[in-house]
Amino acid sequence: MAEVKHIPVSFTQSAITELKAIRDQDQVPADHYLRVGVKGGGCSGLSYVLDFDRKQDFDELYEIDGLAVIMDKRHSLYVAGMEVDYQSGLNDRGFIFNNPNASSTCGCGTSFAT
């Protein structure tokens, strides 16, 4: 593994627990890491990425509570300071992105504008 740096986003304990459960349940290959970042699209302009993937050329490698995380270093501008949470209630179930860089978000909470 390459040098591990301080990740510019944070994860709540419930998000980490759920991500580890997904990784184990889906039997994610050892050469895949949790990818966090953004991509163009969505009703507000940018959508969040939270998936397991292979490391690419522009990716930085991070570690948080035993979970290896990768992020394209060009995405840090959009997600620096963001907190990823997981809620498992009856009305709100899923990952929640609390992003201080978002000037607006969509109703579903998975897309935003800067």
Image (cartoon, rainbow, N blue to C red):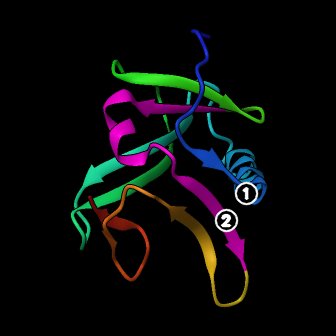
| Left/right of residue 94 with respect to residue 81 in the rendered view | right
Asked if the magenta segment contains residue 77, the reply would be yes
Q: Which residue corresponds to the image point at 58% horizontal and 54% vertical from the top-left?
A: 83
Question: Which residue type carries mark 2?
Answer: Tyr
What's drawn in magenta, residue-wise? Answer: 68-88
Q: Residues within 10 Å of mark 2 (few under 14, many from 20)?
A: many
CA separation in Å, label 2 and label 1: 7 Å
Circle 2 — which element?
Answer: strand
Q: Are marks 2 and 1 in contact (CB under 8 Å)?
A: yes
Q: Which residue is mark 2?
A: 86
Q: Which residue is mark 1?
A: 18
Assign the C terminus to one quadrant of the image: bottom left
Q: Which residue corresponds to the image point at 73% horizontal and 83% vertical from the top-left?
A: 89
Report the front residue among 11 and 35: 11
Question: Which residue type carries mark 1?
Answer: Glu
Q: From this view, report whether residue 59 is shown above or below residue 114.
A: above
Q: Earlier in the sequence, mark 2 or mark 1?
A: 1
Q: From this view, report whether residue 68 is shown above or below residue 51.
A: above
The image position of residue 102, as x and y in percent, is: 35, 61
The image position of residue 69, as x and y in percent, is: 58, 33
Q: Which residue corresponds to the image point at 69% horizontal and 72% vertical from the top-left?
A: 87
